[in-house]
């Protein structure tokens, strides 16, 4: 393409975004057009900037990378999404691929690997770190296992996932109602459904599970 590939960077760690921006701006065919610090900002900035590709983490505040990717793909189906995460959680690799992400790389990938993945994505190719590819293959070949809590998480509705994340981040019921613009009774209903579906007994257990899923940073 004649113009540079326009990129939106999304990560809640400033140093990661700054380092990535410096790396990408060294390439004449790549241009960073914006940055986002949480999942909701990713969706908002994507709609505002219409980037060619978004590079995003999974564990981000307010809205995790999985849900943000779904919203972006729904509104901007032509926008490519590249996941860059510290963790290789196999329980949602399949979900991300179904959403239509163009790649899943681990943060220990080299700068050249990331640049290569961006250019591949623009050619409609899918790039994954070797360990991610192995997990996809293993999951395909392995027999179906009993439904785990991780699998039950996938049964949560989009709204329940939003409430789940905010509870995990320590938001009170009042703060959740204000953030999502829903009633207190609705929040309580979602909370009860989430606890029942996942077999959780307290917000502390929920937070630990969110960390295990890689949706919330342990030091949040």
Image (cartoon, helix red, strand yellow):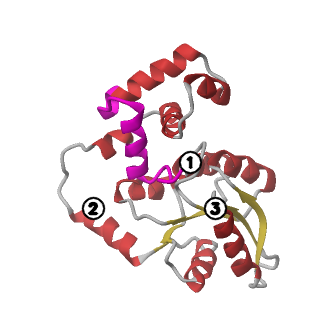
Q: Earlier in the sequence, mark 1 or mark 2?
A: 1
Residue interval drawn in magenta: 196-220
Left or right of 51 on screen, residue 138: left
Q: Which residue is mark 2?
A: 139
Classify mark 1: residues with Cα within 10 Å, few (<14), some (14-19) or many (20+): many
Residue name at image x 35 percent, y 59 percent: 90
Q: Disc 3 to disc 2, how far (Cα)?
A: 31 Å
Queried whether the magenta region covers residue 141, the answer comes back as no
Q: Which mark is residue 70?
A: 1
Looking at the image, is mark 3 or mark 1 nearer the viewer?
3
| Residue extending farthest front | 219
Queried whether the magenta region covers residue 219, the answer comes back as yes
- Residue 169 x, y percent position in the rendering: 53, 40
Q: Which residue is mark 3?
A: 13
Q: Disc 1 to disc 2, how far (Cα)?
A: 22 Å
- Residue 155 x, y percent position in the rendering: 38, 36
Residue name at image x 34 percent, y 65 percent: 136
Residue name at image x 25 percent, y 44 percent: 148
- Residue 92 x, y percent position in the rendering: 40, 54
Q: Quadrant of the N terminus?
A: bottom right
Residue name at image x 22 percent, y 64 percent: 141
Pointer 3 with pointer 1, Cβ within 8 A: no
Looking at the image, is mark 3 or mark 2 nearer the viewer?
3
Q: Of helix, strand and loop, which one carries label 2?
A: helix
């Amino acid at each position: 393409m004649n113009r540079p590939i326009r990129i939106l960077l999304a990560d809640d760690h400033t140093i990661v975004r700054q380092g990535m921006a410096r790396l990408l701006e060294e390439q004449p065919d790549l241009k960073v057009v914006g940055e986002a610090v949480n999942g909701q900002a990713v969706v908002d900035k994507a709609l505002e900037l219409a980037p060619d590709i978004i590079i995003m983490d999974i564990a981000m505040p307010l809205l995790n990378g999985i849900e943000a990717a779904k919203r972006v793909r729904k509104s901007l189906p032509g926008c490519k999404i590249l996941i860059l995460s510290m963790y290789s959680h196999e329980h949602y690799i399949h979900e991300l691929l179904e959403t239509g992400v163009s790649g899943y790389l681990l943060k220990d990938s080299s700068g050249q690997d990331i640049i290569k993945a961006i250019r591949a994505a623009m050619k409609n190719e899918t790039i994954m770190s070797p360990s991610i590819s192995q997990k996809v293959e293993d999951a395909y070949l392995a027999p179906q296992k009993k439904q785990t809590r991780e699998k039950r998480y996938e049964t949560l509705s989009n709204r329940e996932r939003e409430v789940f994340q905010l509870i995990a981040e320590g938001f009170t019921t009042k703060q959740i109602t204000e953030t999502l613009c829903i009633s207190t009774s609705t929040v309580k209903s979602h909370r009860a459904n989430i606890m029942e579906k996942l077999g959780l007994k307290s917000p502390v257990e929920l937070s630990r599970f969110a960390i295990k899923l890689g949706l919330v940073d342990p030091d949040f």
